[in-house]
Image: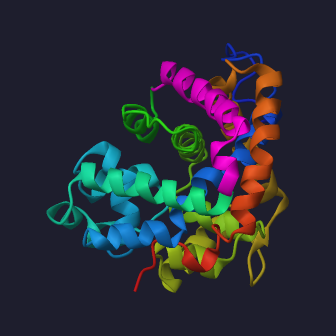
Amino acid sequence: MADMTDELNPDWPQPAALDPAVVRRAWRVTEPLHAMIYFVPEAHERYAALGLAEPAGYFASRAAALGPVGPAPVAATFFNFNPALVARVLPAAWERATPAAVLAARLAAADAALTRALGDLVHGPEMAEAAGLARRAAESAGAYPEGRPLFAAHAALPWPEQPHLVLWQAQTLLREFRGDGHVAALVLAGLTGLEALVLHAASGEASVRFLRRTRGWSGEQWADAVERLRGRGLVEGDEPTLTAGGRAQRAWLEAATDRLATPAYAVLGAEGCARLAELTRPMSRAVVDAGLLNLDNAAPRPR
């Protein structure tokens, strides 16, 4: 959209005097410690034990904080999944397992997977310090729940006791806080969830195959979205890539998302954000090296 700049509006009061790039670094470095829960066999196995084979395990586990909701709120808040895929598993999943049981299984999976990957780091002083910093940021984000339903639901959950699980839960909250803000930016840009995926693929940062497989969109639906974006001048070519306008749109979306995530980290300041990234970098590297982010294990897996 031509009138969008890197600022939401330079005349609006700013929520925090903190460089969004500093916030983005703290989030990106720490994110693998949360994101692994969508890939690890420990999670799939525990959901399956409750009778929730994928993709039911993914949708139920991430939505459980909302209670036994149906497919419409989940499709709306998750944003880029085919609603028909969500409707295949919700609300039927709640006939097999309660939200409380699913949340317990998710936390147990996080415990097992992080312990497997991190070894002695789980019990070290660096873990305790990182957990304390991340929790401060996550709890401070509770002052900004408006328009952030997934964050607000997860923020109401009780905190675990072990530091590595505190860190995992804090990063989960920070991820949903950022994600809710990202959805707001996408809506403001006039993009549907599917169109946002097409732009993401056209940027070269993710494959069409992976995004279609995990989000449940057909080839025809994907092609229709490509044509809509082509008509808006955002993609070009037989194998769509971003136009100059598409690159500008993506840059605005990322900048807006960074800005909307910044209030959560204001309590830490630049020094605290840098320290969080310093502490979690070796932990996240261990998670990656242990294969906990193997895309072949991504959930959901539409059949």
Of the pair 80 and 238, the residue shown nearer to us = 80
Give the colouring mode of the picture: rainbow
Residue 284 appears in the figure: yes
In front of the other: 230 or 79 = 79
Taking depth in this image into account, of 231 and 101 the one nearest to the observer is 101
Q: Quadrant of residue 135?
A: top right
Q: Is residue 236 left or right of residue 185?
A: right
Expressed as whole percent of the image width and height from the top left, the position of residue 2 reads 75, 44
Q: Is 192 situated left or right of 189 in this image?
A: left
- Residue 4 visible in the current orientation: no
- At 31% from the left and 56% from the top, the residue drawn is 102
Write down the region rendered in magenta. Answer: 119-145
Residue drawn at point x = 29 percent, y = 55 percent: 72
Where's residue 38, x and y in %?
Answer: 52, 63
For the image shown, how many numbered marks are present on the structure?
A: 0
Image position, residue 89 (x, y; %):
27, 69
Q: Residue at the spot x=29%, y=72% of the render?
A: 49
Examine the structure image and report whether residue 259 is included in the region drawn in magenta: no
Q: Give the dominant element type of the magenta stretch: helix, strand or loop.
A: helix
